Image: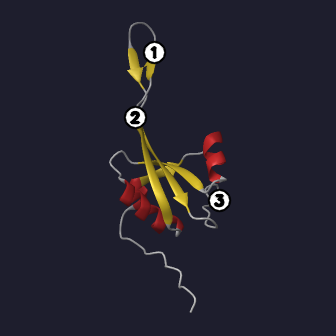
Amino acid sequence: MAKKEKATKKYNLNVSKIIVSPWVTEKSSVLASENKYVFLVAADANKSEVKKAIVNLYEVNPVKVNILNIKGDKVFRAGRLAGFKKDIKKAIVTLKEGDTIDILG
């Protein structure tokens, strides 16, 4: 008997609050050729929530999810006043061979 492929399970959660947007840069397009996709996610999102959101949104099962917290850089303004860019959180989602996500479409 042939093995049955596991169906993607739909989870009941608000995807728009977890995944903010895809992160499209030169480096992320190189990673896409390795079946790794980069997303900007909410600051309080964790790996399991991101994985469930990807399943709901793109109907693919991620193999692995890595999370990066990036601290905002210092930005100098006019005079003595200085500010900071926002802190962001990125998720790198790895898919198995053959699965793809159409980010631009």
Q: Which residue appears at 40% of the width and 15% of the height?
A: 82
Q: Is mark 3 on a helix, strand or loop?
A: loop
Is residue 102 depicted above or below 8 in this figure? above
Q: What residue type is labelled 3?
A: Gly
Q: Position of residue 89 (x, y in %)?
A: 42, 42
> Which callout, 1 or 2, points at the residue further toward the start of the chain?
1
Alpha-carbon distance for marks 1 and 3? 37 Å
Position of the N terminus, as image quadrant, is: bottom right
- The residue wearing badge 3 is 105
Crowding around mark 2 (Cα neighbors within 10 Å: few <14, some 14 to 19, many 20+) is few
Say which of 92 and 76 sits in front: 92
> Which callout, 1 or 3, points at the residue further toward the start of the chain?
1
Q: Which residue appears at 42% of the width and 7% of the height?
A: 79
Q: Position of residue 81 (x, y in %)?
A: 38, 12
Q: Residue 87 carries which label?
A: 2
Instruction: Tell me if I can see residue 25 in this picture.
Output: no
Say which of 12 and 35 sits in front: 35
Q: Which amino acid does label 1 sit on?
A: Phe
Position of the C terminus, as image quadrant, is: bottom right
Q: Where is residue 78 in the image (x, y as percent from the top left)?
A: 46, 10
Is residue 99 depicted above or below 65 in this figure? below
